[in-house]
Amino acid sequence: MAIDTPATIVILGAGPVAIETALYARFLGYEVRLIERGEIGQSMRQWGHVRMFSPFSMNSSPLGLSALAAQDSERSLPEKDAILTANEFLDQYLVPLATSDLLSGSILTQHEVIAVGRQQLLKREAVGSSQRSETGFEVLVRNHERHEQVIQADIVIDCTGTFDHTNHVGSSGIPAIGEFESRAQIEYRLPDILGNDRERYAAKQTLVIGSGYSAATNVCLLGKLAAESLETHATWITRGETSQDDQAEPSGPMSRIADDLLTERDHLAQQANYLASSDDAHVTHWSKTTIEKIHYDAQGDHFQVTLSGEHAGTHTFDRVIANVGYRPDLSLYRELQVHQCFASEGPMKLAAKLLGESSINCLDQTSHGAESLMTSEPNFYILGSKSYGRSSQFLISVGLDQIRELFSVIGDRAELNLYAPVVLPE
Ligand SMILES: Cc1cc2nc3c(=O)[nH]c(=O)nc-3n(C[C@H](O)[C@H](O)[C@H](O)COP(=O)(O)OP(=O)(O)OC[C@H]3O[C@@H](n4cnc5c(N)ncnc54)[C@H](O)[C@@H]3O)c2cc1C
């Protein structure tokens, strides 16, 4: 059933997908409120020094570009094929968009969403009844002074991503022994190894855990740091075998994607494999090795780490970087009736489509149609990286497809596409 303007849409988060969703909704005439726990693009700020692997044309929408041009015709925008760092993307595109006249009054930063519920309805009530779609939502938010308020909404779109919640380092997914106690000292994300965090890693022995692009990024940065600060060393452990792809020259922990169109990504995988397999004294790679125990010794400012597998034994490291993936925060919608996937923790319909895919190339991801975005809670949607649950295959370009498809359902206009190029009559 269409929800007509001027209904109120509350969007959780203010990352790239949330900002683009808000813009689309504002163009259609909806009342919009975005609620962000930090600043605009808070998750991306945490890896602001890292170069994105998708070009600017894939990370921006026609609507966003028009809104910026309308706001300031003198503004110079990045080239379509520019490969920006996350900070450059924020400075040159996302923040100007968020602070444009269309959106600036709609965003509440420094407010955390605590929970979403249905007005006057408990989770176990009105199961399968139209009563749920006829009732609005209540969103509990809290600011930094711990002041709480409830915001009402007709539609809620959760775009809070997954970056705030990391997986554990234990080989079965549970925390390794001692991990909880050492958590504050373990780095789970992407420190600015060549910039603000240089002193923390220079001339130190660092353990890097994981086989994804975040781990590869950190290993390459540590390799660069070692070229300047010779005592720097990284031990990189991965659970799997060293990849033996035909194309992978040299072979290493990163599976390279054949003819990868995202050249920056392929370059990263290649460079990380080179460091892992070469005789470079600054990087050692141990495959088929996992974490059993981890203990941070505050007096010595170092970790005792017990490993299992091919390199079983107890070792001392100054620093530990665990790039073991991210997971969605399910607590936000615990009071709603959202059916989620037992494997990925993504919303069920989309998760079922994604589970059927085997490609490791996120460029192969396309949107899966408007129907896959419907949840079992009417008028509650999950877009952006959170919609992929624990999968790391999400790209902003997929989020833009999701936005277009979702609003064709909300407005009940199958052909609605505000991103379509304008074709002038001959
Ligand atoms: C190192 C790295 C490189 C990447 N490179 C690329 C790339 O080149 N191209 C690409 O398309 N993707 C890339 N990605 C994936 C990228 O992170 C996502 O595509 C993009 O950030 C997803 O946007 P999002 O809006 O869904 O989520 P996010 O960017 O994670 O935004 C979520 C927002 O919600 C806020 N939030 C969270 N919880 C709450 C709460 N309870 N209350 C209020 N606010 C909350 C967060 O602070 C954040 O601002 C990369 C990821 C990493 C880690």
Image (spheres, rainbow, N blue to C red):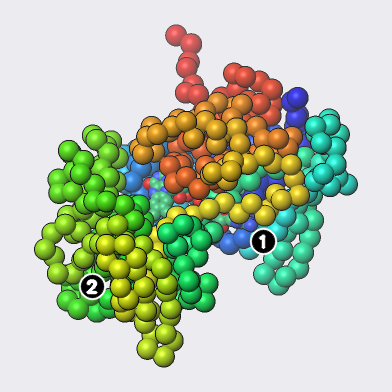
| Depth check, front residue: 266 or 174 | 174
Question: Which residue lies at the image location 74% right of the left edge and 34% below the top edge?
Answer: 378
Left or right: residue 280 compared with residue 297: left
Label 1 residue SS: strand
Q: Amino acid at mark 1?
A: His
Mark positioned earlier in the residue sequence (2 or 1): 1
Question: Which residue lies at the image location 48% right of the left edge and 74% below the top edge?
Answer: 178
What's the CA distance linking mark 2 and mark 1? Answer: 40 Å
Instruction: Name which quarter of the figure residue 395 lies in.
Output: top left
Residue 219: give x, y in percent of width and height.
Answer: 27, 62
Is the residue marked 1 within 8 Å of ligand 1, measured from its CB? Answer: yes
Question: Which residue lies at the image location 34% right of the left edge and 56% below the top edge?
Answer: 239
Circle 2 packing at 10 Å, graded few (<14), some (14-19), many (20+), is many
Q: Amino acid at mark 2?
A: His
Question: Which residue lies at the image location 20% right of the left edge and 44% below the top edge?
Answer: 244
Residue 393's label in the rendered image is none
| Depth check, front residue: 148 or 334 | 334
Whether residue 406 is visible, yes or no, is yes
Q: Which residue is mark 2?
A: 233
Q: Is residue 153 above or below residue 325?
A: above
Quadrant of image for the N terminus: top right
Left or right: residue 266 compared with residue 336: left
Quadrant of image for the C terminus: top left
Instruction: Name which quarter of the figure residue 132 lies in.
Output: top right
| Depth check, front residue: 332 or 46 | 332
Label 2 residue SS: strand
Left or right: residue 155 compared with residue 329: right
Left or right: residue 50 compared with residue 268: right
Q: Which residue is mark 1?
A: 111
